[in-house]
Every structure is written in C-alpha cells, then in structure tokens.
Image: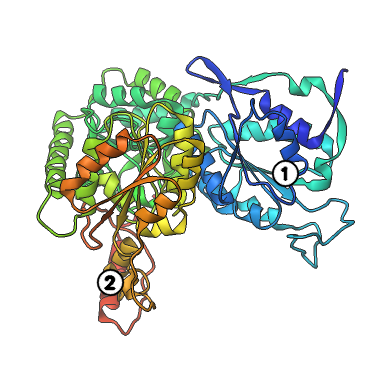
Amino acid sequence: MSTVRLTMAQALVRFLCNQFTEIDGRREPLFPGVFAIFGHGNVTCLSEALEAVKDTLPTWRGQNEQSMALAAIGFAKATRRRQIMVATSSIGPGALNMVTAAGVAHTNRLPVLLLAGDAFVNRRPDPVMQQVEHFGNPTIGVNDAFKPVTRYWDKIVHPEQIISSLPQAVAVMLDPADCGPAFISLPQDVQELAWDYPETFFEPTLHRVPRPRPDRESLAEAIAVLKAAKRPLIISGGGVRYSGAEQVLADFAEKHGIPLCETIAGKGAVTHYHPAHIGPIGIVGSTSANALAGEADVVLAVGTRLMDFTTGSWTAFSKSATFVSVNAARWDAKKHRAVAVVGDALESVNELEAGLADYKADALWTEKGRAEFAKWNAALDGYQKPTNAPVPTYAQVVGIVNAKAGDRDLLITAAGGLPGEVMKNWRVKAPNTFDCEFGFSCMGYEIAAGWGAAMADSSRTPIVMIGDGTYMMMNSDVYSTVLSGHKMILIVCDNGGYAVINRLQNAKGGASFNNLLKDCRVKEPFPVDFGKHAESMGALTRHVESLADLGDAVEWAQSTDRTTVLTIVSDAFTWTPGDAWWDVGVPQVSERPEVNAASADQLAGRNKQRVGV
C-alpha cells in the first residue's frame, strides 16, 4: 500500500480538499472554505496546513468565533446543505464561543464542520493556558460542551484516527435525517504528529445527498388518509427546500386543490403568489393559514419538525385532525401519532402523487383558502400603507424594502420583532430567497449569515434586517464583509431596545421592565448612532428620516460597491396581527391583577392543546 507521511493536521486538510459534491450536475468542492481565528491550539499546526492550500481551500478571518461559525451556517442555508464550511478556533474560550452556533446548526438541521484546538493528550505541560481542569475527571475539557449540540463529536488522540473519523463526520453532515454540525477536537500535540497515511485516503471523492424512499405500507396508509380527506391542508417546511422539492410540492398542491401554508423555515419554497399558497401558519402566521388549520381534517406536514411556532403550541388544529408527516428523520415524522412517511421529501411527494391519482379536495374548501388569503393580502396592504405617523411601523418598513428588493435578493433575519413581521409582510417573489433563523432564534445570526450567504452566491445581494438590540449584540461582521468584499445591505430598525420581548412581557400582565432602554437601570437611554459605528468599519451608511425617504435609500444601497447600512427609527408598540396562541410560563399567583388575569387565560388556552392524540 502506497503511503504519504504527513502531520495529522496536514492530512486532515488534504482530506477536506479532496471532497466534492454535485450541485445541479456540477462538481463543486464539498468544503469551499474555512472561517478561522487562529490562536493557542490551532495556529502552529492547523494554520501551517491551511496556508499551504490557501488557493484551493480559502481561509477567511473572522472577528468572533461565534459569528464566523454562524456565517458558515448562513452559507449552508444559502447552498441548501449542498456545501459545508469549516470553522476553526483555538482552545478554551475560542472554542466555547462556537457552542451557541453549534446549537443553531443542530436545531435547524444544518451542516457545519467545527474544528477546535484542545490541550495536550500527554498532559505533560498541564495545565496549559486556557485549559479548564476538572478535578474529578481529567479527561473532561471545555470541548465536551459541544456534545449536546452536535450530531457528531470526536476527539482525535492518535493521528490514525482521522482515517475513520472524517468520513463519518461527512456522512452525518450530508445525511438528510441526521444532518447537523460535526465537531472534532484537535489536541495540539496530536496535530503535530506525523503518520504514514494511505494515499487512498486522499483520493478525490464525489458525494451525493441520499434520497431515501418511504416504506410502501406507510405510503399506502398515507394515501388512503389523504384520499378520504374533505378539508386537507399542506404545511411546507424547511425540508422541502433542502430536498429540492419546491416545484414538486407546489404542483402537487395545485393539482389536488390543497391549500398550502408554510413554516418559518419553509417560507420561500413557493412564492407568495402561487395559486395554492395561503400564507404562513402559527404564532407568527397569517389569519388565512390559521383559519384553515383550525378546520382541516387532514394535515400533510412535509419536511417540518412541527415546532411550537408552527403549531400554536398544538392549539392551531382540531383535536380530531389526522396528521400525515413526510420527513427524512423518523424522530420528526412520528410526532403526535402522525401517519409517518419516513423518506426524502421530493421522492415521497412524487410517490404520494402517483397514489392519489385524480383526487381533488372539495372545491369549496379550495376556494375558502383563496378567499381567506385574499382577505389577508388586503389586510397586509392596509398595515403596510404609509401614514403621517411620526414613527413608522415594522410592517411599513418591511413593505417598502420588499417592494424595492430584486426578485432574487435574499432576505435574512433571526430574532426580535422582525421574524414575525417579515413572516407576515414579506411577499416572496422567487423560491429560496428567504432566511429567517427561528429554530434557535439566535440574536447575532443575521449579519454573520449575510456574510456567509454573500460568499455562497455572488449573483444576489443579501438584505439583512435587524433591530437595534441585535446590532448591539453582534455587529463585527460588517467589518468582515468590507474586508472580504462580500456586499450585503443591512437595515437597522431602532425601536429603543428589546421591543418584542417587552410586548410579550406586557401581554402576560408584566410591567415593562429591563427590555426597552427607557425601562432599564440606566442614567439615561442614550441613543446609539448605528450609522457612524458602521461607517467606522468601512461600510457606506445613510440614516433614513421617514418612510418617504426609505425607498430611495434602498435603491441607493443597491447601487453601491460595498456593504451598505441604512438606519431608521421604528415603532416599538405596533405589530401586525394574525398570531396563533403561544404556551409560555405565566405566574399562577401575583400581586399584579394583570398577571393573574393572564394566568387564567393561559390555563384556558392549554385546554385547547392536542395531548396524546
């Protein structure tokens, strides 16, 4: 057997360089780049290996370990899980900064390869700088913190181990059912060790995402349930987009007259204007989708994990409704005693189509979906219509930005009040142009994801919409995009603090406390000039004084040659209605009568939940 002598770090990098993926018939690198902050634990060995291949496997320097891993996740979303970015950190605090990002990837079923430095396996110099010692178990280190938030976890204690570990990590990240982050801990003394690696380990390998077919009997059961349905409803989830099943599901819904609504992750699989589309469902949903959900007798859930924001904490549906759940992951397909069709979304919908033949939903039901959606669109027009109010609402801002956005421009948001407002008010013009990270609802995802998305597809411009709270939490990748030349348009809506959490606090009877800046323990609620701050990082900026100026500002931002930031003051108290009920903890006793009333309402809402059905 022919071998080549390499350090473990060099071998790891060479392996990554020789992995490829197929995208629309094209052969592309599976790992197109690395986000890296070098330090104690990855700068001497891993960086030496990466520098040698910098033109094959580009390395991009981030400003924060969490944000560069979030950028890798934004990249994965933009490529619909067909390519995987790597993020690497030093040991200790650098590694732990990536834990939150791992949680985002794990929750959203997204691939990212995380490589963190670690202390010495031989323990000779212990304790080293940034090492956390566990007195009762010296094998435990900070990298163990990744175990709950990764799909694959390994610690390399011998250079030969990567021969078995790396292919398994790749397999997990490309598996439609198990997809999520892979983490590999790299002790610095093992990184330096040389080993005679078989040359076959580095042979170019082309990976294709598998498409598992559903079981025939479960498929037949699902078809029988659907054929008997009088008022069927389709919920389109994120798995539809990752499977590439957008057109197939859209055609399926239209042919059979089944109204189609969308989850947060699924928004954008079909356009807002598709004949079967009736809007988003759930807590940040539309009155149209929520109205039909309450009457549906069969719910066909495709590629969704059915989180509480989709199901209204399981109050959005009739307790007698039957669920048919199509999902590559058995865990998701089996929820709430659904008729589980475990398989790839595209293949499963095609096989359902073959079995349904000429089935059509009742024409009155189909027409009801269209009528409710027409009423919803008319309501949106009203919410978005400019007024003479001194401070614009989110709906008005989103409406103007949406109107000015190009058909393929990608909208990105994640936390605060904007997810609900863009779910309702953003009318998707082309498939796969919407990214709202709400599985983990991670504040700080947005700007980093904009960098990753711009890197993934230079033919469109990410439009990132955030609040002032998110900007303050993580903004350093504005600088990253300027440095690397990956343009995005960033729109900062300043409503004076964490306004949507203040809304929830008030809605459940609580007094405004520690959310809006005016309600915090501060000397004075001093306003931040976000434009000047972004300008100091090299971005072009403009403060928008009114809605009348916003459209022109967006057009200007589209014409610039680098990341451009628009800031606008927005209303902290006006929200677009349409929500379903949400189960949150409310104190059962309180000195505030408003809290006691909210508690009674909350207990009444729980009586509507589907439990054990």
Where is the N terminus found, in terms of image quarters? top right
Q: CA distance from mark 1 to mark 2?
A: 47 Å
Q: Is residue 68 left or right of residue 414?
A: right
Left or right of 340 on screen, residue 143? right
Instruction: Check disc 2 and report its element: helix, strand or loop.
Output: helix
Residue type (three-letter) at the residue carrying disc 1: Asp
CB contact under 8 Å: marks 1 and 2: no
Instruction: Identify which residue is drawn at 35% across, 33% down.
Output: 433
Residue 144 image position (x, y, % from top left):
69, 54
Give the x, y percent position of residue 293.
Answer: 26, 44
Residue in the image at 35% along x and 53% along y: 531
What number of labels is visible? 2
Q: Residue at x 19, y 49 (%)?
A: 396
Task: Determine if residue 567 is in view.
Answer: yes
The one nearer the camera, 409 or 550, is 550
Name the residue tied to disc 1.
154
Q: Residue 363, position in %: x, y?
A: 15, 28
In depth, the one of 35 and 591 nearer the eye is 35
Q: Quadrant of residue 192?
A: top right
Percent coordinates x, y for residue 7 in the rendering? 82, 34
Q: Which mark is residue 598?
A: 2
User: Callout 1: few (<14), some (14-19), or many (20+) C-alpha neighbours within 10 Å?
Assistant: some
The label on residue 392 is: none
Work out whether mark 1 precedes mark 2 in sequence or the reverse, and give the earlier one: 1
For the point 11% across and 42% down, the residue is 378
- Assign a secondary structure to mark 1: strand
Q: Is residue 153 above or below residue 342?
A: below
Q: Is residue 341 visible?
A: no
Kind of residue sitting beneath label 2: Ala
- Residue projecting furthest to the left: 388
